[in-house]
Image (spheres, helix red, strand yellow):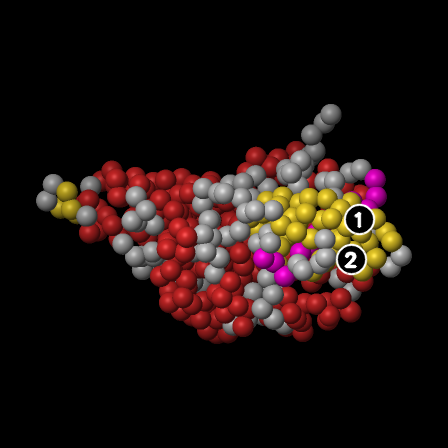
């Protein structure tokens, strides 16, 4: 069975430019990404050449200002692009989402001079980014991070370890949150650190159950010197910058989850129409038809939820609650839908000869990254009833 069954999604895009852009994305996904996805994932191969192609095609900076090399596209368009890329291969879709997340701090909080100096290369110059917030002892409790930055004249010296870093060891630049003050969120500052900075090294990539082509590794900062000109925002503003980025990043994860779920549904529908049992296609059996109907409904609901949150963002309105809801719903739905796709294929679904087993393994990580789904429930509840009392 091919890595990607024929797609079934009709996009609603706002402009002719967006439609042309999406046609390019679909062509790249179908010709360059999907045909090699299973083989390269099994081999643990990271497709850096694909990211170079996406960069040169203007697809790594879609939601950012064209003055700095971005695409001036609404976030709703950017997310649909992520969905399409993730349906072809999650390593690529999620990688583009993380890259966009890594550019957020500079694009939204950097000075004009900083943006002019760095953003064009980050958005369209072939560079690849990493977002460095989590640490071995501070994942969900990110405000307790321990990586420290100490002022030394017109430089900062960074020491500590970041964990679970997508593109760890291969990124050209890192958006790094480090402690410059006291305990808690107000003591954290954001920095833009070159990937080749002296004293910055990567541990061996984590051995994961899915997304084996996407390197995830700890990064060690051993006295890394960073000019103050690479500090983003004010001292102590870093945690607020990080949370702002995560609101947008959670929508990227939601879109990727819908992409993986859509790929699983497409594969299940294709198989159900071809596989025959008891003298007829298994798609004729009501139990399976209802299962496919539920899968499709979950995908449409998830897509509508992330697009509504994106429209709020595009209008400049608060969208944090909706972003948490989208991340929660879409990733839980993807886990359920990919599991059901394996069931549709039966024994074949459990083999690596068909892509649905890979989709199922990949869907699991989406419930964890950029805030576990338990954290998303906490965020939603705080919007509803306020913070917890202690």
User: Residue 64's x, y, as percent?
Assistant: 63, 66
**Residue at image point 78% right, 69% down:** 113
User: Residue 231's x, y, as percent?
Assistant: 78, 57
As drawn, is 337 to the left or to the right of 101? left
Q: Residues within 10 Å of mark 2 (few under 14, many from 20)?
A: many
Disc marking residue 149? 1
User: Residue 42's x, y, as percent?
Assistant: 39, 50
| Res. 241 visible in picture | no
Task: Please tell me which of labels 1 and 2 falls first in the chain.
Answer: 1
Q: Secondary structure at mark 1?
A: strand
The reply to whether dot 1 and dot 2 touch (C-beta < 8 Å) is yes
Disc marking residue 226? 2
As drawn, is 14 to the left or to the right of 275? right
| Res. 1 visible in picture | yes
Q: Residues within 10 Å of mark 1 (few under 14, many from 20)?
A: many
Image quarter for residue 169? bottom right
As drawn, is 346 to the left or to the right of 154? left
Q: Secondary structure at mark 2?
A: strand
**Disc 1 to disc 2, how far (Cα)?**
9 Å
**Residue at image point 67% right, 37% down:** 138
User: Residue 199's x, y, as percent?
Assistant: 72, 53
Bounds of the magenta segment? 170-182
């Amino acid at each position: 069975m091919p890595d990607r069954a024929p797609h079934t999604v009709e996009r609603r895009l706002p402009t002719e430019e967006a439609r042309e852009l999406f046609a390019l994305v679909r062509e790249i996904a179908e010709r360059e990404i999907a045909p090699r996805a299973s083989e390269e994932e099994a081999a643990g191969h990271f497709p850096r050449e694909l990211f170079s192609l996406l960069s040169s095609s203007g697809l790594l900076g879609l939601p950012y200002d064209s003055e700095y090399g971005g695409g001036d596209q609404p976030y709703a368009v950017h997310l649909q692009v992520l969905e399409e890329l993730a349906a072809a291969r999650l390593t690529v879709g999620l990688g583009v989402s993380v890259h966009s997340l890594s550019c957020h701090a500079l694009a939204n909080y950097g000075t004009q001079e900083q943006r002019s100096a760095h953003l064009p290369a980050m958005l369209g110059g072939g560079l690849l980014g990493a977002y460095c917030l989590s640490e071995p002892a501070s994942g969900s409790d990110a405000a307790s991070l321990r990586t420290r930055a100490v002022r030394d004249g017109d430089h900062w010296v960074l020491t500590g370890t970041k964990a679970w870093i997508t593109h760890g060891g291969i990124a050209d630049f890192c958006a790094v949150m480090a402690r410059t003050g006291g305990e808690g969120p107000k003591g954290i500052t954001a920095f833009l650190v070159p990937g080749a900075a002296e004293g910055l090294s990567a541990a061996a990539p984590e051995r994961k159950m899915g997304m084996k082509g996407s390197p995830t590794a700890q990064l060690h900062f051993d006295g890394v010197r960073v000019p103050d000109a690479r500090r983003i925002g004010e001292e102590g503003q870093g945690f607020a910058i990080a949370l702002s980025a995560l609101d947008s990043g959670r929508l990227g994860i939601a879109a990727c989850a819908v992409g993986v779920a859509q790929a699983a549904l497409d594969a299940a529908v294709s198989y159900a129409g071809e596989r025959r049992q008891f003298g007829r296609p298994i798609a004729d059996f009501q139990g399976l038809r209802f299962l496919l109907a539920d899968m499709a409904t979950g995908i449409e609901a998830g897509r509508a939820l992330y697009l509504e949150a994106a429209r709020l963002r595009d209008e400049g309105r608060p969208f944090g609650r909706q972003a948490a809801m989208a991340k929660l719903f879409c990733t839980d739905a993807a886990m359920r839908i990919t599991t059901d796709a394996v069931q549709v294929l039966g024994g074949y679904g459990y083999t690596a000869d068909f892509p649905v087993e890979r989709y199922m393994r990949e869907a699991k990580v989406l419930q964890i990254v950029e805030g576990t789904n338990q954290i998303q429930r906490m965020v939603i509840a705080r919007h509803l009833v306020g913070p917890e009392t202690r």
